[in-house]
Amino acid sequence: MGGPVLRRKLILEGPVRTADGAGGFSESWAALGALWADVTLRSGRRAEAFDVETSLTSYRITVRAAAPNAPSRPRPGQRFRDGSRLFAIDAVSEAGGRGHYLICYATEEGAV
């Protein structure tokens, strides 16, 4: 028995705020690096916002651990990209007591 099978390449992205010159800002996303992951479906549900029906699906995404302050360590508020699919990171915890892996709890939103 080994650890998780990290066979899916995901791009870790972080938000970037740029001043708009009028006291506000615009937000875009910048790639922080690629991580190999094990992506496991947790649950899904239907949601409605502004009269638009969407699908919210939650995932457990396991990646190799990185030091707490390393830029390659996922954090809540960041996201993973897999082509056109986006997984918003809701929470991150260490897997097991050895700290070899991190578990990222993420949500994917899609049109129904």
Image (cartoon, helix red, strand yellow):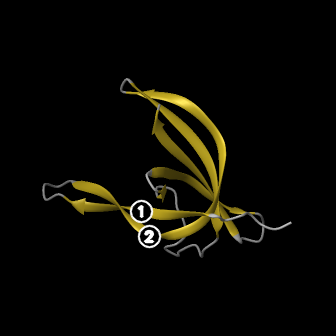
Image coordinates for residue 16, horizontal then vertical, percent: 33, 62
Name the residue tied to disc 1: 14
Quarter of the image containing the N terminus? bottom right
Instruction: Report if the CB atoms under discs 2 and 1 are less than 8 Å apart.
Output: yes
Does dot 1 land on a helix, a strand or a loop?
strand
Which disc, if any, is residue 107? none
Give the vertical position of 41 relative to 104 (above or below): above
- Image-quadrant location for residue 101: bottom right
Q: Earlier in the sequence, mark 2 or mark 1?
A: 1
Q: Position of residue 53 (x, y in %)?
A: 44, 27
- Image x and y of residue 29, in percent: 36, 60
Amino acid identity at mark 1:
Gly
Rate crowding at label 2 as few (under 14), some (14 to 19) or many (20 or more) other CA atoms within 10 Å. some
Instruction: Specify the farthest residue to the left.
Output: 22
Mark 2 — residue?
A: 32
State left or right for residue 65 relative to residue 70.
right
Q: Residue at x 48, y 64 (%)?
A: 12
